[in-house]
Image: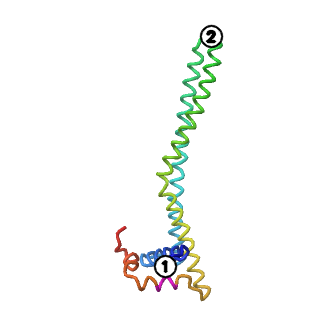
Amino acid sequence: MRDFKKLHMLKLCLLRNYLARNGFASPEELGILQKVMEEDDAFLTKNFTIKNLAALLVVLIFAALGAVFILEASPEGHRIFLAGMLALFVIFLAAALRIIGYVISHFSDAKKRSTRALARDIQELSASYIMEQNTEYQPYREMELMIANNDILKEIIDGKAIF
């Protein structure tokens, strides 16, 4: 298979057959599964907000400690210099924490990205069920024939394959 569109169709057909074998064979059942996945995705989004608030809290603590330190400095010229240095330090610290947060979230949010992709695939499968009910068109007929002639693909659907 050299066509990415057919490969995507094969993936969707395998997912459709796997879900149908495990009790999700109608658009309504797929809708319920999609809602459950979206609720999990909403929970993961809340964790991202908590990480942003934690970084903001660290920056504010350093700013408050620096303000106390500046007030303790005696000469006026040093206060202005210390205030400028503190402002630069807080900006640098905020940028560094934001970059570190993005790097960490890139690796930790892989599950969230795959969940969203699976939800899009389930939505597409639900639409294909509705299309088959309303028309004669069967978008996965060619892929069904390919699966019927391949034992490895049958094992994937039966859940016997180990990834």
| Residue 156 screen position, x and y as percent | 39, 75
Asked which colour scheme the image uses, the reply is rainbow
Residue behind mark 2: 75
| Residue 115 screen position, x and y as percent | 50, 62
SS label for mark 1 = loop
- Label 2 neighbour load within 10 Å: few <14, some 14-19, many 20+: few
SS label for mark 2 = loop
Residue behind mark 1: 25
Which residue is most to the front? 2
* Closest to the observer, 97 or 115: 97
The residue under the point 50% across, 51% down is 106
Which residue is most to the bottom? 136
Residue type (three-letter) at the residue carrying disc 2: Pro
| Residue 94 screen position, x and y as percent | 57, 36
Which residue is most to the top? 75
Extent of the magenta region? 141-145
Instruction: Assign the magenta stretch its main secondary structure.
Output: helix
- In the image, taking residue 148 as reference, residue 53 lies left or right, namely right
